Amino acid sequence: MEVKDIRNQLVKMLGRDKVLTEELDLMYYSYDSSFLTKLEPGKPTAVVLPTSTEEVQKVVRFAYENDIVIVPRGAGTGETGGCIAFKGGIVLDLSNWDEIVEIDASNMQVIVRPGVIHARLNEALAKYNLFFPPDPGSSQMCTVGGMVANNASGLRAVKYGCTEQYILGLEVVLSNGDVMMTGGMNARVIKNVSGLNLTKLMVGSEGVLGIITQIRLRCWPKPKARGIAMAVYDNLDDAPATVLEVYQAGILPSGIEILDSSAIMAVNQFKPEINLPDAEAILLIEVDGNPPSVDYEGNAIAEIAGQRARSVEWATDPKRMAELWEGRSVTATAAARVRADGSRIFAGEDISIPLSKVADVLRAIRALGNKYGIKVVNYGHIGDGNVHTAPVINPENPEEVEKVLQLVHEIHLLAIEMQGSTTGEHGVGAVRRQYAELEHGLAVEYMKGIKQTFDPKGIMNPEKLF
Amino acid sequence: MEFKELPPVKDQIMKCVRCGKCRSVCPVFAEIRNETAAPRGHVFMVQMLRDGIVEPDEAVAERLTTCLLCETCSVNCPSGIDIHELNAAARSYIYEKNPSLAKELVFDSLWTRPGLLRTSTKFLWGAQKTGLQSLARAIGLTKILPGDLPRAERMLTNVPVRSGRSQVSEINPARGERKYRVGYFLGCATDMFHPSVARATVDILTWHGCEVIVPRDTKCCGQPHIANGKMETARSLAAHNVKIFNSYDLDYIVTDCASCSAALSHKNMKFLLGGLKIEDQAMAFSEKAMDLTVFLTEVLDIEVPNAEIARKVKVTWHDPCHLANAQGVKQAPRELLKRIPGVEFVEMANANSCCGGSGTYCITHHDLSMKILDKKMERAMETGASKLVTCCPSCIMQLNFGAQRHKWNAEVVHIVDLLSPFYKALPKKAASQ
Ligand SMILES: Cc1cc2nc3c(=O)[nH]c(=O)nc-3n(C[C@H](O)[C@H](O)[C@H](O)COP(=O)(O)OP(=O)(O)OC[C@H]3O[C@@H](n4cnc5c(N)ncnc54)[C@H](O)[C@@H]3O)c2cc1C
Ligand code: SF4
Ligand code: SF4
């Protein structure tokens, strides 16, 4: 079908206001937050902005009948090029469709449309003393649909897990335009083991199996109290050792974050007034729950960490907590500003490694940075082994770009070699699919088989994930 | 300077990691809701312009000018990008390449010559009688006021017959002992629409021991020109004003208009005049320049006289973007409000969200501007205040219109208007020599 006709048909279906067809407008949809799309932007053939299941169905059915690629998109904060139509196709920008359909507080659940912004959902739930625990750093901007599609999580995943644990059921528009309800989409239950678990299959499917148009989420009661411990280490190995010892003491903190020396330096350079102590590593351990248990666990953590750390401070005063946490909260920003004539990039930014190997991997990444002459800033969710590496380069210098791509490749290989994964939370998309065979072997064939069942024509977000 | 060589274009575009943080704070994106209106979209498009991938044409200008230049994105960008400066620079580049798109008459002639501009207030005054459309036709204003004239007409503030400048002297001696010699930058809008503010500002400053110099031949601060892609004109205006003020021996330079104080600030001077011969002079100038609210609270640390005449009044504050975002000034006006006897201050939710006025934006993008305004008014009305206070004439015009639109009977006033009665009631203090 001619491009012109595709565009005309879409306008006929959804109306002028919900379809972008001008070349200039389409260019704005050629990127997400990945470094890849800075190098290789991918312009779609058209963008549609549906706000109902029927509208999504119409577009998908049309695409199916005419063999046109469909790429769902939330807020475009993914770091893998997942929402990009690299070879053209129709992008479904679902970020407009942000209705909170129902908060069923008495059953501890909520139904949302895919475009609801994570932070807005939690604001609405807070009125009922509820929350949706996964907390990505992109909470203010990413959509819940994007979170489901990427199985996102955040720094509290160590206690609260990932998005998948909270999805009770989904409404999905399949590649032929049919609507499928999975799991408990039409029920109001929390426990439900009937049938093959298609909900879990859809979570993390990155738009390659269908378009998620409605989500039933389980919510949790909001904890009443929090406290934060900061431990400062002269020896990097002592940081993961503390983490293990905290677990062994029967304590499950709600967040355990690490800043290595590169991150400490970046933070101090960005905001000298934060004045983090010069050290090999800093751990920030957050505990939440009811006040007595928070106190008990905080004091226990301080004692455990104190056996290895140069210094430990435990705080429950909100002002002091904010001060302790500030170093962590500005790390990403600080990483972006390490070099006046450069920037951090989102590439190789999300490996996941066994806790027992965290220190070795951090050292290895530092060595790789030296090998390529590239500054790297390391921080992350050490509690579950999720390391965020921020390479800092001049992204407009071709030599630096070439080097950083090699560096990033080596970081991904390192993760696999260390029995880790190339991605702990951001997903695979286009940037990490080259590692699928290496990570999953035979399983990739079965993934492809599943894709074939859901999407026989191969129009749903092709060339992503595997 | 060539577009590609401008500091933000040269150094900052590459810093955008497209994280989307700016999407979450942009008032325009919240309405348009597709990527073409996202701040990072603007950064991307400026990059495309820089790299010659798109042409500097009307279509690109149309997308870029949906932006209010409110700077909310810039202050929230983790990579420290001055997104609004990139946008302004790109507009200017496009207009340079397409003179026919530019708003030549208004911004190059009318708004650069104070005399003409003042004459035009008479026109505006006439416009209230004869209709904005006929006036616009008469002076070529239709170029910047496409389509929405009948609606825009309703927005015009009452234009006083006498300008502010005609009511204040060039040299106003301090009352009592002189502490400082202060240059007062009397902006166009205060001059035209709020002459009483100009008078009161001089009264307040002189009462607190300032000799106030109001240079006669200052020109517009250049903000409207930056917003409308006339960077070269903005540069020459800024250079002119720098020279005029530097010719006096001043301790401070103050202005009661938030947009002007942003224009006079170090950051904007750097943006406009950085790298030019006049840079050092401009830096010396901007080091002395500040918003009146900061000057009154932080330098003069004033105590408002005549507390006995105070009447109880519940007020709320709207942060002008040019004050809160461009200059990071939020505390000073609140502190000043708290020092005004009788004032009960209530904070409104999101006080620093843009009102959607942004100079001519409320006319060029009327519908969008009204949606942004409606959100602002909702939050203002929730406070139950009887006065909505701010310090930017453009915001005052927009908020006034909002109050009418929502049939809210609160008064929209300049902060100086709240202070003014306390100084009017004063006994005469001897002027210093
Ligand atoms: C600064 C920053 C911090 C971040 N921090 C975290 C973090 O802490 N944890 C984390 O997990 N991630 C993080 N991310 C990554 C990203 O924000 C998440 O993956 C997020 O869930 C993506 O949501 P989105 O709405 O932007 O989706 P998009 O980027 O638009 O899309 C992501 C993928 O989901 C698919 N998709 C989107 N909507 C749908 C739908 N309705 N149906 C089917 N498929 C769909 C797209 O095709 C694409 O493959 C961060 C990103 C940034 C820029
Ligand atoms: S917040 Fe800054 S770095 Fe992030 S997308 Fe916007 S402009 Fe780019
Ligand atoms: S300056 Fe204001 S309107 Fe313009 S892009 Fe930034 S936040 Fe949006």
Image: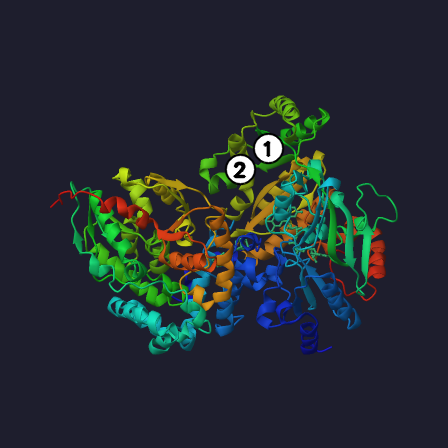
The quarter of the picture where the N terminus of chain B appears is bottom left
Q: Amino acid at mark 2?
A: Gly
Q: Nearer the viewer, residue A54 or B285?
A: A54
Looking at the picture, how far across and down is residue B263, in whole percent? 34, 56
Q: Label 2, on which residue?
A: A327
Looking at the picture, how far across and down is residue A356, in whole percent? 71, 34
Q: How many marks?
A: 2
The reply to whether the residue tagged 2 has its Cβ within 8 angstroms of ligand 1 is: no
Q: Give the mark nearer the N terminus: 2 vs 1.
A: 1
Q: Element type at marker 1?
A: strand
Residue B49: in sight, yes or no?
yes
Disc 1 packing (10 Å; few <14; some 14–19; many ≥20): many
Q: Amino acid at mark 1?
A: Leu
Residue beneath the point at 71% across and 28% down: A247
Q: Is residue A91 left or right of residue B90?
A: right
Q: Nearer the viewer, residue A238 or B414?
A: B414
The correct choice, above or below, for B186 with respect to A380 in the image is: below
Q: Nearer the viewer, residue A13 or A72?
A: A13
Q: Is residue A87 left or right of residue B137?
A: right
**Residue A284 marker:** 1
Residues at marks 2 and 1 on the same chain: yes
Q: Is residue B105 left or right of residue B21?
A: left
Looking at the picture, how far across and down is residue B239, in whole percent? 28, 61
Mark 2 and mark 1 in contact? Answer it, CB < 8 Å.
Answer: yes
Q: Is residue B108 left or right of residue B402?
A: left
The correct choice, above or below, for B210 with respect to A209 in the image is: above
Which chain letter goes with mark 2?
A
Which chain letter goes with mark 1?
A
